[in-house]
Image: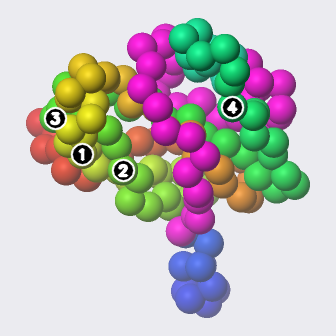
Amino acid sequence: MDKSIMMQDIFVGFSEEKRLNKDIDLKEFVILTTFNQTLDIYSKLNDKKFSRSEPIPTLFDDEFFILLKPRLKMFKYGDIDVVKIEKEKSVLNVYYTEIKNEEYLLNKQKNPILILRLKGDVPSNVNLIPLNIKLK
């Protein structure tokens, strides 16, 4: 098999849909493939302090959302930055770095949540891989 063709399918394009902080009981990642799943998550993320919430995003053909909520190890009031996403068989490897966030520190906000929009086949699993953390 031509290696250059194999390499093309490794990197997965993504765009950021929403970024927030919320202390909510969720897994480290949640895959959303339907509007009802998205509606359910957005209702849990809705801030009761504001009477009007933002519109719920819709998925188009061949798209899905991944909600990421990693446990931070470096910064109590930090955030995450997704560096790249690679597909290995039916598993997505999400490489991220923990970043210092002065606004979160000032407001004592933790528990960053990031929702990404991706195209392609829905993965069977997601691995969150921190790049700037020494694993013991």
Secondary structure beneath label 1: strand
Of badges 4 and 3, nearer the viewer stands 4
- Height in image: 29 above or below 24? below
Residue 56, by quadrant, is top right
CB under 8 Å between discs 4 and 3: no
**Separation of marks 4 and 3 at Cα, in angstroms:** 31 Å
Q: Which amino acid type is shown beneath numbered disc 3?
A: Met
Queried whether the magenta region covers residue 18, the answer comes back as: yes
Residues marked 2 and 1 touching at CB (< 8 Å): yes
Question: Which amino acid, by three-letter code, is at mark 1?
Answer: Ile
Disc 1 to disc 3, C-alpha distance:
8 Å
Q: Residues within 10 Å of mark 2 (few under 14, many from 20)?
A: few
Q: Amino acid at mark 2?
A: Asp
* Foreground residue among 107 and 67: 107
| Disc assigned to residue 99 | 1
Task: Look at the numbered disc 2 and give the secondary structure of its residue.
Answer: strand
The image quadrant that residue 101 belongs to is top left
Q: Is mark 1 in CB contact (under 8 Å) with mark 3?
A: no
The N terminus appears in which quarter of the rendering?
A: bottom right
Q: Amino acid at mark 4?
A: Glu
Mark before the other along the chain sequence, 2 or 1 = 2
Among the two numbered marks 2 and 3 on one chain, the one whose residue lies closer to the N terminus: 3
Q: Is residue 121 above or below residue 75?
A: below
Relative to 49, residue 52 above or below: below
Q: Say which residue label 2 marks.
A: 81
Residue located beneath label 3 in the image: 74
The residue segment tinted magenta is 11-40
Q: Which mark is residue 54?
A: 4
Callout in the foreground (1, 3): 1
Q: Residue furthest right?
A: 61
Residue drawn where x is 56% and y is 35% of the image: 67
Which mark is in front, 1 or 4?
Answer: 4
